[in-house]
Amino acid sequence: MRWHRYMWEQGRHHLFKGGAFTVTAICFVLVFILKPKLLNDGLDLNLGLVKHVGSLIETFAPDWGDRFETFSRFINFERILLFSEAVAAVKLIMLGIGGTFRLVRRICNKHVGRTRT
C-alpha cells in the first residue's frame, strides 16, 4: 500500500468525525436562530432523563441520588447529552448518504465493467 493511500485510510475516520461535529455545530446555530424552542424542548427532555436516572440511583443508594443530580447540573450534562444525540443523528444521516453513494458507485462500476468485457 502506498503511503498516501495509507494516510487516507487512517485519516478518513477522523475526517468523518470532524465533519459530523462541524455539521452539528452549524445545525445548532441555525436552530438557535430559527427555532430556539426546539433546543428548549430537547434540554427539558434531557433534564427529565437526568432526574429520572437520579431517582433510580436514589432508590438503590440514597446518599448518591442528590450527588448525581448536583454533579450532572454542575457539568451541564443535559447540554452534553443533547449535543451528543445530535452528533449521533448527523452521523447516521451522513452514513446513509455515504452508503447510498457507495452503493451507486459499486453498481456503476459493475455495469461499466461488464460492458468493457
Image (cartoon, grey):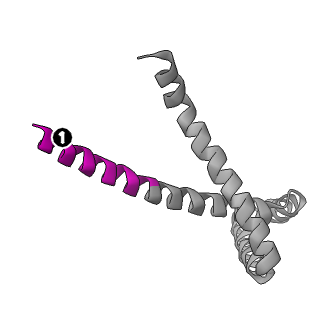
Q: 34 or 78, which is in the foreground?
A: 34
- The quarter of the image holding the N terminus is top left
Magenta run includes residue 16: no
The residue at which mark 1 appears reads as: 113
Q: Name above or below for residue 83 compared with residue 110.
A: below
- Give left or right: position of 41 versus 73: left
Give the amino acid type for the residue marked by disc 1 in the picture.
Gly
Q: Name above or below for residue 7 compared with residue 84.
A: above
Q: Is residue 54 visible?
A: no
In the image, what residue occupies the spot 44% across and 59% down? 96
- The quarter of the image holding the C terminus is top left
- Give left or right: position of 63 versus 87: right
Q: Main secondary structure of the magenta part?
A: helix
Q: Name above or below for residue 56 compared with residue 14.
A: below
For residue 49, which quarter of the picture?
bottom right
Q: Is residue 48 visible?
A: yes
Measured from the top left, where is residue 109 in percent x and y? Answer: 25, 44
Magenta run includes residue 101: yes
In the image, what residue occupies the spot 46% across and 59% down? 97
Residue stretch in magenta: 98-117
- How many circles with numbers are drawn on the protein? 1
Residue occupying the far left of the picture: 117
In the image, what residue occupies the spot 51% across and 21% down? 4
- Give left or right: position of 86 versus 76: left
